[in-house]
Image (tube, rainbow, N blue to C red):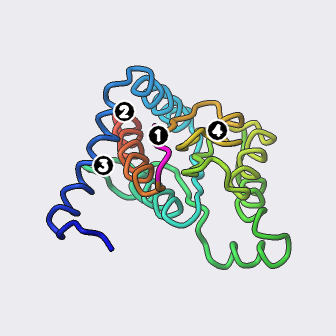
Amino acid sequence: MNNMNSTDQIRAHFEQAQGVLQTMLGDEAMIAAVAAAADALAGVIANGGKIISCGNGGSMCDAMHFAEELTGRYRNDRKPFPAIAISDPSHLTCVSNDYGFEQVFARFVEAVGSEQDALLAISTSGASANVLRAAEQARSNGMLVVGLTGKDGGALADLCDFEVRVPWNGAADRIQEVHIKCIHAFIDRIEAG
């Protein structure tokens, strides 16, 4: 049983989150990695390509959030940008049933990804088999691959043209909290042109 009262537990929660952000902010290489990935994604859009995003669970929610902010509206009114999150339940269940869950993202990338496009692959562990297959397929299609990872980057790190690895080896929630901040930074940069 936890001996902390609820106020102390909540404070510890936010202090831990702040610590992960402070670690990231204090690492110039990490900030440069986010900037390089953001510039690469902005370049894809500027050159007429689209960004396909994918992830599992909370990372799928992040992939969807990224795409809807680009096709819809982030902070300011502007033209919509081409982005698609691989999240259609009929696609996911069809491919899972016919080819296996490891292929749900790769099959979509194979169908609609082309060499002027990018894949935003999100995996807190860098080890999600279906995200890895998507990155492999994106590379096969000649697409740019940007990865948001955590821990040691997993096998996804080696498949990325640009990787942003959150410096955290604990639970996935802290990694996801930084991923969404990176996603917003990417959108800021894309909107800046």
Residue 12 percent location from the top left of the image: 23, 55
Residue 130 is drawn in which quadrant?
Answer: bottom right
Q: Nearer the viewer, mark 4 or mark 2?
A: 2
User: What amino acid does circle 3 point to?
Assistant: Ala
Could you give the CA–CA distance between mark 2 and mark 3, rounded to whole angstroms? 11 Å
Could you give the CA–CA distance between mark 4 and mark 3, rounded to whole angstroms? 27 Å
Q: Residue at x 40, y 52 (%)?
A: 174
Marks 1,2: beta carbons within 8 A: yes
Residue 168 is one of the magenta-drawn residues: yes
Q: Name the outermost residue toward the left.
A: 7
> Which SS type dominates the magenta stretch?
loop
Could you give the CA–CA distance between mark 4 and mark 1, rounded to whole angstroms? 17 Å
Q: Secondary structure at mark 1?
A: loop
Magenta part of the chain: 166-170
Residue 31 is one of the magenta-drawn residues: no
Q: Which residue is mark 3?
A: 17
User: What amino acid does circle 2 point to?
Assistant: Met
Q: Position of 30 compared to 52: left or right?
A: left
Marks 4,3: beta carbons within 8 A: no
User: What amino acid does circle 1 point to?
Assistant: Val
Q: Which residue is mark 2?
A: 24
Q: Nearer the viewer, mark 4 or mark 1?
A: 1
Q: Secondary structure at mark 3?
A: helix
Q: Residues within 10 Å of mark 2 (few under 14, many from 20)?
A: some
Q: Position of 81 compared to 158: left or right?
A: left
Q: Which residue is mark 1?
A: 166
Please tell me which of labels 4 and 3 falls first in the chain. Answer: 3
**27, 113: nearer the viewer:** 27
Q: Which residue is mark 4?
A: 145
Could you give the CA–CA distance between mark 4 and mark 2, rounded to whole angstroms? 22 Å
